[in-house]
Image (tube, rainbow, N blue to C red):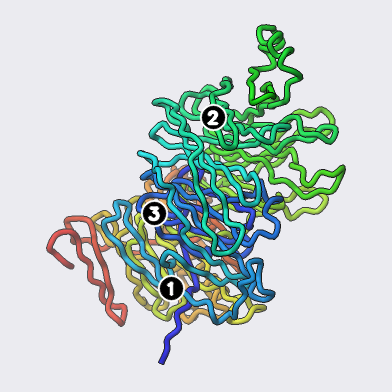
Amino acid sequence: MEVGVERVFIGAGCNRIVNNVSWGACDLLSFGAQNAVAIFCPKTAQILTTLPAHKAFVNCTHWLPSSKFASKARNLERHYLLSGDADGTIFLWEFSLADRKEGGWGKQGTEESDFSVMATMTIFDRDNLRKTTFIFMGATCGKEGEHADKGFCLQWRNVLQVPEKHKKGVTCISAVMVSQTDAIFASSSSDGIVSVWEVILPSSSGGECKLSCLDTLFVGKKPMVALSLTELPGNSGHLALAMGGLDNKIHIYSGERTGKFVHACELKGHTDWIRSLDFSLPLYENGETSSLLLVSSSQDKGIRIWKMALHESLANNRKEETSLASYIKGPIFLAGSFSYQISLESLLIGHEDWVYSVEWQPPKNSSVDGIECYQPQSILSASMDKTMMIWQPEKTTGIWMNMVTVGELSHCALGFYGGHWSLSGDSILAHGYGGSFHLWKNVGTDIDDWKPQKVPSGHFAAVSDISWAREGEYLLSVSHDQTSRIFSAWCDESSSEDGKAWHEIARPQVHGHDINCVTLIRGKGNHRFVSGAEEKVARVFEAPLSFLKTLSHATSQKSSFTDDLPVDVQILGANMSALGLSQKPIYVQASSESKERNINEGIDTLETIPEAVPVVFTEPPIEEQLAWHTLWPESHKLYGHGNELFSVCGDHEGKLVATSCKWALSA
């Protein structure tokens, strides 16, 4: 008798580092999740697969082609992905997309039953000394794998490893698509080296990628952490590489496609580390490309837009180099027989904290005036002030203004590490400090109306334990990211049984210590679980009324525990204390009375401010709702151990709990 195993869910958090996320021309996103590279589809809010090969923390990913070069990705059978880690290793991955109904872009259509993969994931500790395999938490595959989604099959393979690895961690990868089969990418590292590579992609299925090193640039003791590559306008044979880092300057290098790169000039103005750089596509003026724009962001909270334009002639250049006009306009550099002048176009002030990311909106296809595609004058910025902003020039004055601001007002959010555009420009995505994603979509017609959307979620540190609900309604996991999370298949009444999608529906415990162990027990009339962390106390949590009703929506049936709830005392949710240890209950009828009593009596309520607002969800909650409004109240503390807890388990009836700590004692 054969047993079939099918993957149903992957949960993973994003590594909290800049340059980690990339949105490809295939409309898939990549990000580093500990030592693995994860791929997720924004349309389904599901992680499709994970790619295990790195032996260290994944720092950055970059698609070939990225969303900027979507116009060159038409009818591509395969897409490629670069990933770099903390050991300096860079891998190149190949993805083949096949439509299962029509045969696919790669003509690899096959029956739906052909796609079945292992439903386990190997979780590595950061020191890579311990590994544990969990069911329904992810997926492990070999060097080649495939994932079946509703509309297409995703097949992938590890193509190659860049032979000359960096001596320290990779900080950034940037690439430019010269043609559909030719790409040039640059990588920076903490070792003070920037490497430039050319990769020739195969033109047919099963071909090999050819990799060659164009140049190795030594940038000194202050390494570069931001890169951007572009083709110079009017000069198809030359490239420009912008890099910025710890010396507060933007360095421009120029070079040929097959030659060496030379230092062209420096751009000064920022007063702190450069964190992000992005070249626009060449600007069309009178049907010709004579200039392009470079946007830069810094830890000085500012954003600068630089214009790189073709200069008139070499003779005029030599005369104007020492003139006052040349000094105001900016430096001039030579690239072959062409000269270019860089000037500061605009200074954007609006963020209140470090600006980690800036990105031009991807180009749109056009057939106007013979232009294949044009890039909208729109910049997306992401900052540690918990906001993303869209900047555009005013139609009348041309002054760059902040047109749209979105963000997270929750006290749990600690800022964004990066922001990215969708291919169509109607969605923007950010990843934050807690390994979380935040997606907004413009649902307005006449005016902009940006609304939060569903995204995948998961732990961003080692998963230490999992436990199934007593009747299998959900899966509870705990992690060294100091959270416990509940995942469940959300059933849509309008969809079939195969249409179930797994989502995180609650985050019952947000702790101040790494959580080591958990077990679910069945108390009278409710769900309860016991967790142990790096402390001497085991804590008991009880499901509130809001969760039970949310669970009934998720499972499309009334929870078996709802009828047994006590009538006189109903706990709606929980509040977190200022220290993040104990979670206090919020009662259905007493919540408003307690607020009035605290105001009248003058009691200092800073310990529970801001207060949670428990809500019954009729669809999967988004990140800001999970982080604060789905907490469970703590009902008991179990004392007895003299050291931090290591493991906990319960008997089959859910009446006895056994705990152990790092000493040879048990209670």
Query: In the visual, does 579 lie left or right of 599?
Result: left
Residue situated in front as seen by the camera: 75 or 220: 75
Position of residue 18 relative to residue 266, above or below, is: below
Q: Amino acid at mark 2?
A: Phe
Residue identified by numbered label 3:
54
Marking on residue 485: none
Residue identified by numbered label 1:
119
Residue at left 43%, top 74%?
118
Residue situated in front as seen by the camera: 409 or 111: 111
**Between marks 2 and 1 in the image, the one whose residue lies nearer the viewer:** 2
Marking on residue 261: 2
User: Which image quadrant: the C terminus?
Assistant: bottom left
Query: Residue 204 location in percent, x, y?
Result: 60, 61
Query: In the visual, does 130 lie left or right of 184?
Result: left
Q: Is residue 287 visible?
A: yes
- Mark 1 element type: loop
User: Which image quadrant: the N terminus?
Assistant: bottom left
- Mark 3 element type: loop
**Between marks 3 and 2 in the image, the one whose residue lies nearer the viewer:** 2
Residues under labels 2 and 1: Cα distance? 47 Å
Residue at left 33%, top 52%?
126
**Between marks 3 and 1 in the image, the one whose residue lies nearer the viewer:** 3
Query: Residue 664 location in percent, x, y?
Result: 12, 63
Residues under labels 3 and 1: Cα distance? 20 Å
Query: Disc 3 or 1, which lies upstream in sequence?
Result: 3
Q: Amino acid at mark 1?
A: Ala
Q: Mark 3 and 1 residues: CB-CB less than 8 Å, in contact?
A: no
Position of residue 321 relative to residue 161, above or below, is: above
Q: Is residue 600 visible?
A: no
